[in-house]
Amino acid sequence: MRFTPTRIQDVVIIEPKVFGDDRGFFFESFNLQQFNDAIGGNYEFVQDNHSKSKKNVLRGLHYQIQQAQGKLVRVVSGEVFDVAVDIRKNSPTFGEWVGERLSEDNKKQLWVPPGFAHGFIVLSDTAEFLYKTTDYYAPEHERCIAWNDPELNIDWHASGQPELSEKDKQGTALKHAEVYA
């Protein structure tokens, strides 16, 4: 596996070594020892999630103010544009974002550490999105930053108005959001 830091050092793109021929392909999608060695942490994943969404569905920008979750995300069908926003108040990259196209073709994964808000938009007709989390889902601690916060100015690589859940329509501007100290 190749681990490549993004412009925000703690967010990392992970690319597996894919072995393929005319029969199909094989790759190791996760190895805890390699992951922790490359990331420089001692993470354990406690929950796996799987979602399916149609084109132009935007989910996010989500985070938990307590029980902060690190997320290892990937796409097994379709394509998304995935975004991580640094919401660690004392970080030199506070309020900055990075994004990456994740698809069934490129097989890339993105490590979004605790302390970041996360979201994605579906670019293909449908997409199936898988992610591992370092802590359990705690709805009482979940928060949402507005996907279209003008101060973040995220380029979602999509045309038209995205389709949002009611929760995501209520997202807060970063300047008014609860963030990590």
Image (cartoon, helix red, strand yellow):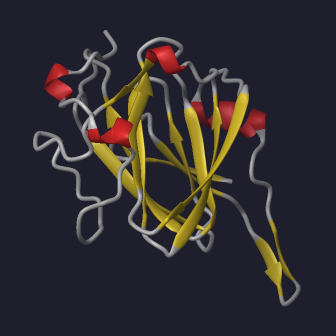
91 horizontally vs 76: left or right: left
Residue 74 image point, x, y percent: 60, 54
Q: Does 97 sit left or right of 9 as displayed?
A: left
The structure residue drawn at horizontal position 38% and vertical position 33%, both measured from the top left corner, is 117
* Image x and y of residue 130, in percent: 64, 50
Is residue 70 toward the left or the right of residue 10 in the image?
A: right
Q: Specify whether 132 is left or right of 155.
A: right
Q: Nearer the viewer, residue 101 or 128?
A: 128
Of all residues shown, which one is farthest toward the front?
A: 166
Task: Please count the marks in the image.
Answer: 0
Check the image and report above or below for 176 versus 154. Answer: above
Q: Quadrant of the C terminus?
A: top left
**Residue 92: image location, x then y, percent:** 24, 25
The vertical placement of 44 against 33, above or below, is above
Q: Quadrant of residue 75?
A: bottom right
Residue 175: give x, y in percent of width and height. 14, 24
Q: Residue at x 45, y 39 (%)?
A: 11
- Considering every residue shown, the one lying at the far left of the view is 150
Give the residue displayed 71% in from the left and 38% down from the top: 48
Name the residue: 66% across, 23% down: 43
Q: Nearer the viewer, residue 81 or 148?
A: 148
